[in-house]
Image (tube, grey):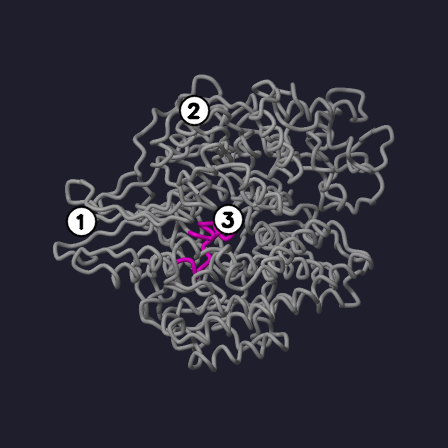
Amino acid sequence: MTRVSIDPITRLEGHGKIEIFLDDAGDVANAYFQIPELRGFEKFCVGRPAEDMPNLTDRICGVCPEAHHMASAKALDALWHVEPPPTAKKLRELFYSIFFATDHTTHFYALGGPDFIVGPEAPVAERNILGVVKKVGMEIAGKVLKMRRDGHNLIQMMAARRVQPNWALPGGVSRGINEEQRQEIEARGREAIDFALFSLQAFKDIVLANKEYVDLILSDAYTHHTYSMGTVDEENRVNFYDGMIRVVDPDGKEFVRYHPSQYLDVIAERVEPWTYLKFPYLKQVGWKGLVDGKDSGVYKATPLSRLNAADGMATARAQEAYEEFYKTLGGKPVHQTLATHWARLIELLYATERWVELATDPEITGPEYRSLPTATPDEGIGSVEAPRGTLTHHYRTDARGILTEVNLIVGTTNNYAPIAMSVKKAATSLIRKGHVTEGLLNKVEMAFRAYDPCFGCATHTLPGQMPLEVVIRDVRGGIVERLTQRLGG
Amino acid sequence: MTEQSPANKTKPKLALYWAASCGGCDIAVLAIDDKILDVASIFDVVLWPVAIDAKVRDIERMPDQSIDVCLFNGGIRNSEQEYMAQLLRRKSKILVAFGSCAHEGCIPGLANLYDREQIFQYVYRDSPSVDNPQGIVPVPEYQAPEGMLHIPVFYDTLKTLDQTVEVDYTLPGCPPEADNIWAAVQAVVAGLGGAPLPPAGTVIGKDTTVCDECARARNEKKIKAFKRTWEILPDSETCLLEQGLLCCGIATRAGCGALCPKVNSPCIGCHGPNSGVEDFGARMMTALASVIDANTPEEIQRIIEDGIPDPLGTFYRFSLAHSMLRRSVLPGGNGRALPLTESPVPEVSR
């Protein structure tokens, strides 16, 4: 048995490690995607006042603290049995739309996009944000930086801080916005819509016009027939902030549509001794291991799965893009993991359109941005769509609102099983008779990069080149070969 | 970036690393916006997992003291992080504890109220969504059918960077604000160019409190009762503490511009205490005692108990791991409050 270790050393929530074992014929016997870190939030938040949770759980992830802030706020609403006023809900969704647009922009241009815009076969040194700039021009680099800066500035204006906001409370938010701030938000939002449209067009021009790229997207190596999860509104359209959670089966048929408070009837988590991260799966289907198909409880919670789980988008231009997406890829559902990048851009457009819709809502500057709770707190569950998947917070407290139990199912965690499967499939399709090719490195990267894994939290920031090293050892541990992929090396 | 081009030979070497953290510190470094390009041009960046692919092996091969500055964020939660802290200390001339986790343990330091067994028991066995009838928990070495799998050893106690290795400077904040990061980078650059560096042990930042940066009107504080944030709608003009909200600005180091009180949210203390204050929680309690309107110790006690139901999590929200309390007592006793030499350094599986 030969062992192939892929150890990025960089962080995939700490960092991730891939161990691939080859059988005597040199083919892949098994592949393990390990997460080597745990911090224990679910335990140490017990004993804390529940209203602290938006600020405590912000610190789970400094890349998407806004997602935890919002899921926590909604769990607190439920916990205290308080309904935020319409202005408060709209402010939260506005804030969340700005965040979503900012986050998806970063991922597309800095992390996911380079593979396509620069090209999967391009030299490693160019396959990063700098290569993107070179290919699409300095003007777009300026647009990307502006989009990020605007998003962060608006988040600070509304919610105190660019990283780690301090704003949400049970029943609403700590402060609303005035007319002058509203105008600023609207103006930046209109620019953001143009940016999103530009980005979709760039994807069409560069990726879809290239048959090689389209074949890659459609190739079996990146296809997994799993269940798809996403939050939908009353008309089954995609929503990031609120709604019912819908799961469709691998054929696209509705499997379950549930309120977030029923998550324990739908989701269970599997523990394995070789990794600190748990594997969520659909309880009614059951855990059958890291396998595809209708009989396996594995599901995806990604931009692609959200589109699959919905019937459409709630804004006009995003709906057009949605229709074009399925028309081009041969109907619903789409199971090609790499199509997630395209789906992410459709979500970017939706987020910017929703941003402007809310910024121009007459209620958005209303003075009623909080309802004070009056009921006794007991139990609350809140959920939002994080950019990387459905995020659920579940709290129980005593009558004073002191936490007695906390359970969290975090965005990327939903996708642990499909990511592990994608990694194994890429390895299996590339490693034959003990021959490991240089291409494996990027192909494996591409397999999990599509998920925008927040194990890699901040990996969706700068040059976006996930450093990888493959060490091939013989049975006694002696190094046979070492392949390293470098950035700008 | 690790390849030694001729131009790099004269550039100072910079390393950035993350241990038990959320990634927010790295986002904060990127949030210095265009100046990040200056950082890239001033330094030869030899390690930055978020952005470049230098390997730990490359760092291990470098001579000791060959990295000029290392910005280290995150606390020390497991064996791999401890190894990295020791490695980077050895290789770096200047080691900076960057951000609240490395400085004080931050929110993840609240895990020191429990031990590994309690955390594992809940996360992997008792959590309501877990289905684990066999009671499996992750183990550092697992014999899979195909071979041995390794993950780092999870410790009982989260330690700060300065409880693990010697630290030269500290940059506070969760995360540090962009202006402060840039000021620190400039100070280091000046130091490398021969300007005097601050004395070792310095916490880089202002030596005033958040109150000094807060625009809210302050009168004489006389607090008869504390309110929880969900209980009242504070006005936008008056000191939040005077309105009964437990604002930590009174004991927290300035440097953020009092951003949270601007949106009616009390300061939660993420920049830690001022220089010379050993224990943030003790400082907070002293400060509060002086503004509580009470005549007897019993009355003070009552006002605190009624309005602050979790004093430990409130006063030590960011600083438990670094405080005089440090952690709860471990089963079997831990001698002093914190077993600083709790675990021998296990072999790191990498």
* Mark 3 residue type: Ala
Residue B251 sits in quarter = top right
Visible residue check, residue A246? yes
Q: Look at the image and say whether residue A30 sits in the magenta stretch.
A: no
User: Residue A460 in the image: x percent, y percent?
Assistant: 50, 53
Whichever of labels 3 and 1 marks the residue nearer the N terminus, that label is: 1
Pointer 3: what residue? A458
Asked if marks 3 and 2 fall on the same chain, the answer is no
Q: Secondary structure at mark 1?
A: strand
Along the line of sight, the residue nearer the viewer: B180 or B265: B180
Pointer 1: what residue? A2
The quadrant of the image that shows the C terminus of chain B is top left
Pointer 2: what residue? B65
- Local packing at callout 1 (Cα closer than 10 Å; few below 14, some 14-19, many 20+) is many
* Mark 2 residue type: Gln
Q: Are marks 1 and 2 in contact (CB under 8 Å)?
A: no
User: Residue A2 in the image: x percent, y percent?
Assistant: 18, 49
Magenta segment, which residues?
Answer: A448-465
Measure the alpha-carbon separation of dots 3 and 1. 32 Å
* Mark 1 residue type: Thr
Residue furthest to the front in view is: B6
Q: Secondary structure at mark 3?
A: helix
